[in-house]
Structures are given as structure tokens and as C-alpha cells.
Amino acid sequence: MRIALASDHAGFPLKDHLAASLAAAGHEVADLGTDSTESVDYPGFAERAARAVADGEAERGVLVCGSGNGVAIVANKLPGVRAVNAHDADEAEMARRHNDANVVTLSGARLDPATADAIVATFLTTDFDGGRHARRVDQITAIESAAGATETPA
């Protein structure tokens, strides 16, 4: 699977670990930065990875910042992206099964590498249940479309 991976400085150590773990598991990893713990602004990195998912360049995205919240907010601004800030493997599983989430965000400050590996592995191997959940995902897509139709160009 092709995975878009990005972080800010607070998430860099965990992102670096995940890049190695994902590659070792046979995934193609597009590491979209950052490349150190030097302070950076997260929105650009999160957007780059989320856009790769939205545009079909990556099948899934994994984003890391200090809390996982900021990168989730950014990712969810892009149409077609359904990002979840997962704190454990159960949340990641339900986000895939019920919401067809395609981006998982993680807290670099609160998750140890083993827990992050378990969350990401679950996120990547869990299928969307479809059925009644597909109807709900379609409703989310309709809300995105309606919101985009009312936006005015800057």
C-alpha cells in the first residue's frame, strides 16, 4: 500500500520510527516531511500528505504532531479526506469500519512507538464495512460538496 506520511517537529521522532516500520512491512512510504525536530508549522506538511490521499497518489495517510489534533483539523479541510485522531487500535479499527477513514493522525507526545505501530497496522488492515455506514459516508461527502459550492474564491 502507498502511504503518505508527514509530521511537524513534535511528531518527527515517531514519524521517523513509523517510516521504518511501514517500509519493513512492505509498504511504499512517501515521507513528506518534516526532517528534524527543528520547529516548523504543521499545516503545510499535513496538507501535503492529506492532498496526496485526496488526489489518489496515496491510498492512506499517517500524520503526526504533538497531539494529533492540529494535523487532523488540517487534513479534514480537504474534500475526500476523512481523518481520525486515534489513541488506540480500537479507535483506528472503528474509524475504518464505520467511517471509511483514510488518514490517521497520532500524538507524537503521548504515544509510544509500539502503540503507534499497533494503531497504524490496524488502520491499514481494517476494511470499511459498507452497508448502512456507506450511506453515512455518502452524507459526509454531500456535506463537503455543499460546503465547497458555497465557498467564494479568495
Image (cartoon, rainbow, N blue to C red):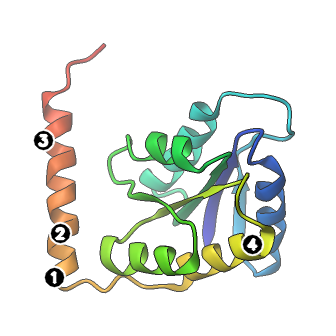
Three-letter amino acid code of the residue under disc 3:
Ala
The residue sitting at 45% across, 42% down in the picture is: 73
Question: Of marks 1 and 4, which one's residue comes earlier in the chain?
Answer: 4
> From the viewer's perspective, is residue 28 above or below residue 72?
below
Q: Secondary structure at mark 1?
A: helix
Residue 63 coordinates in the image, percent (x, y) = 61, 53
Q: Which one is earlier in the sequence, the residue at label 3 or at label 2?
A: 2
Taking the view exactly as shown, the residue that stands out farthest to the front is 110
Q: Quadrant of the C terminus?
A: top left
Question: Is disc 2 surrounded by few (<14), some (14 to 19) or many (20+) residues within 10 Å?
Answer: some
Q: Which residue is mark 4?
A: 22
| Circle nearer the viewer, 1 or 4 | 1
Q: Secondary structure at mark 3?
A: helix
Position of the N terminus by quadrant: bottom right
Q: Which residue is mark 2?
A: 136
For disc 1, the marked residue is 132
Q: State which tag comes first along the sequence, 4 or 2.
A: 4
Residue 64 falls left or right of residue 127 = right
Disc 2 to disc 1, how far (Cα)?
7 Å
Q: Position of residue 105 (x, y in %)?
A: 56, 57
Q: Separation of disc 4 and disc 3 at Cα?
A: 36 Å
